[in-house]
Image: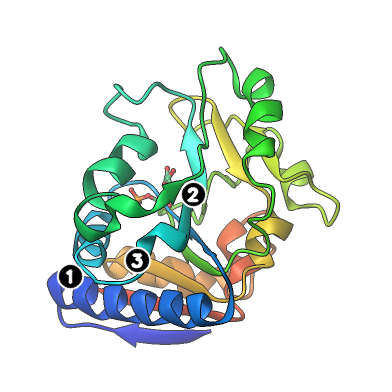
Amino acid sequence: MQWREYPDRELLAMGLADALAASLKSALNLHDTASFCVPGGSSPGEVFATLSGVSLDWGRVHVFLNDERWVPESDPRSNTALLRRTLLTGNAAEAVLVPMVNDAPTPEAGIPDLVAGFEGELPISLLLLGMGQDMHTASLFPGGDRLAEAMADDAPLLVPMRAPHADEPRVTLSRPVLAGAMETHVLIFGDDKRTAVERAEGMDPMQAPIAAFLRDATVHWAP
Ligand SMILES: O=C1O[C@H](COP(=O)(O)O)[C@@H](O)[C@H](O)[C@H]1O
């Protein structure tokens, strides 16, 4: 694990957006398309907004979420709506969005149709993860009802997840899919999350799911 520390969140957004743009350009030099897997939640908005202004061949970038809350896009908690507002705009409006949610009533009912959209997208070219204070990442929650299935070596691509501290049912990419990414970055803010990452490093990923991704990751932190 490598740390990159920034004096404030604005500088982090600029530095991380630069690093992600450079990685996307490198991936596009080698392949026809690049898959870019990103978190939702409250942390990445400014990074996405900065990145959306970067000039690159966005039409060859396929964007998808680490995980999604099983809510319609009209819901304020929709990660897809966050992506559309902040990343898939400006220069990046040309990027291709791979859906992580559909109109089915539950993740279990919706997943079979979603899986088809991921054909040709793996391994992930560039992965950005967030993390909650409880050390969950994507929707791999400690205490999640299907965490063991999602963390297993033979896990399916997408796993439904319900957890005590998740407000709604979720769908998440599984641990082996995320861990297979060619390059991994983690975005966190604040002293509490910094301490959580430092603690997670030696922990069992079933208690601290972020631990499964730290070894080869660059962690970007600002106060
Ligand atoms: O619920 C989620 O939480 C994590 C962390 O979000 P944050 O609000 O603490 O930044 C996020 O990475 C994940 O994608 C999201 O669904």
- The residue where tag 1 is placed is 9
In terms of image quadrants, where is residue 77? Answer: top left
Closer to the chain start, of discs 2 and 3, is: 2
What type is the residue that disc 3 sits on? Ile
Decide: few, some or many residues near mark 2? Use Cα within 10 Å; few <14, some 14-19, many ≥20. many
- The residue where tag 3 is placed is 188
Query: Is residue 9 positioned above or below 140 on the image?
Result: below
What type is the residue that disc 2 sits on? Phe
Decide: few, some or many residues near mark 3? Use Cα within 10 Å; few <14, some 14-19, many ≥20. many
Q: Residue at 16% across / 82% down in the picture?
A: 7
| Alpha carbons under labels 1 and 2: distance apart | 24 Å
Instruction: For marks 2 and 3, give the one nearer the viewer.
Output: 2
Residue at mark 1: C-beta within 8 A of ligand 1: no
Instruction: For marks 1 and 2, give the one nearer the viewer.
Output: 2
| Alpha carbons under labels 2 and 3: distance apart | 19 Å
Measured as percent of width and height from the top left, residue 75 is found at: 30, 23
97 or 218, nearer to the observer: 97
Q: Residue at 57% across / 81% down in the picture?
A: 30
What count of labels does the image hold? 3
Closer to the chain start, of discs 3 and 1, is: 1
Whether residue 130 is visible, yes or no, is no
73 or 199, nearer to the observer: 73
Decide: few, some or many residues near mark 1? Use Cα within 10 Å; few <14, some 14-19, many ≥20. some
- The residue where tag 2 is placed is 64
What type is the residue that disc 1 sits on? Arg
Looking at this rendering, what residue extends furthest in the top direction?
Answer: 105
